[in-house]
Image (tube, rainbow, N blue to C red):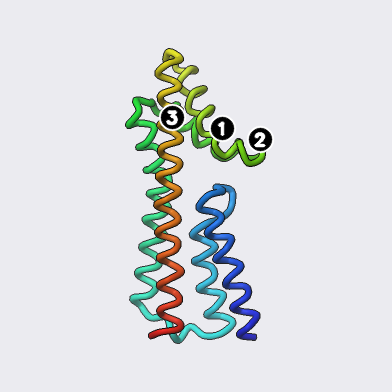
Amino acid sequence: MEITAWILVILLFLVGMAGAVYPVLPGALAIYAAFFLYGWMVSFAPFGVWFWLLQTTIVAVLMIADYAVSALGVKRFGGKRASVIGSTIGLLLGPFVIPVAGLLIGPFLGAVIGELITGTDLRQAVRAGIGALVGFFSGMVVKLVLQLLMIVLFLVWVLVL
C-alpha cells in the first residue's frame, strides 16, 4: 500500500509542477492533495500543525500571487483592467486554440485585444501584451519555486523529521 501511495503522490507532484506552466492543470492544489492522499494511505502522523499551517499559507500565497503577478506585469507596462482580463482569457484558451504556442500567444493576444477594445492605440496595446508575457513568466517562476518548496517541506516532514 505504501508503494502505491508514493507512486500516486509523485504523480500528483508532477501534475502540480506541470500546472505551474500549464494553467489548466491544478498546480498547487494537486500537490496539496498529495499530502492528504499520503495521510489517508500511509499515515497522517508525520504532519503536525506547523506542517499544515506552512503548506496552507503557501497555497494561499500561490493563489493570490498567480493573479497578482500577472496583473502587475500588465499594469507595469501601462495596461488597463481590460488587458488583464484579456490576458487571463488568452492564457486559458490559448493552449486549446493553438497547442503549445498558444501558451505564449494567448496571453499576449488577449491583452492586446483587451486594450484595443477599450480604444487604446496599437503601440500601447502591444506594450500591454508584452507586459502580460512578463507577468506570465514571472508568475510561472514564483509558482515553480513555491510549489517546489511545498514538495521539499513534505519530504522533510515525512523522511527526515
- SS of the residue under disc 3: helix
At 51% from the left and 65% from the top, the residue drawn is 31
- SS of the residue under disc 1: helix
- Under mark 3, the amino acid is Ile
User: Which corner quadrant of the image does residue 148 belong to?
Assistant: bottom left
| Separation of residues labelled 3 and 2 (CA atoms) | 19 Å
Image coords of residue 46 (percent x, y) = 43, 84
Quick check: 126 above or below 8? Answer: above
In the rendered structure, the answer to whether residue 19 lies left or right of residue 63 reads right
Image coords of residue 111 (percent x, y) = 48, 28
At 39% from the left and 37% from the top, the residue drawn is 71
Which class describes the residues within 10 Å of circle 3: few (<14), some (14-19), or many (20+)? many
User: Which corner quadrant of the image does residue 124 belong to?
Assistant: top left
The circle on residue 105 is 1
Image coords of residue 84 (percent x, y) = 44, 32
Which class describes the residues within 10 Å of circle 2: few (<14), some (14-19), or many (20+)? few
Instruction: Point out the image quarter for the N terminus.
Output: bottom right
For marks 2 and 1 on the same chain, the one whose residue lies earlier in the sequence: 2
Instruction: Point out the image quarter for the C terminus.
Output: bottom left
**Relative depth, front residue between 137 and 111:** 137
| Separation of residues labelled 2 and 1 (CA atoms) | 8 Å
Q: Which residue is mark 3?
A: 130
- Under mark 1, the amino acid is Ile
User: Which corner quadrant of the image does residue 58 belong to?
Assistant: bottom left
Which class describes the residues within 10 Å of circle 1: few (<14), some (14-19), or many (20+)? some
For marks 1 and 3 on the same chain, the one whose residue lies earlier in the sequence: 1
CB within 8 Å, label 2 to label 1: yes
CB within 8 Å, label 1 to label 3: no
Q: Which residue is mark 2?
A: 98
Image coords of residue 114 (percent x, y) = 48, 24
- Under mark 2, the amino acid is Ile
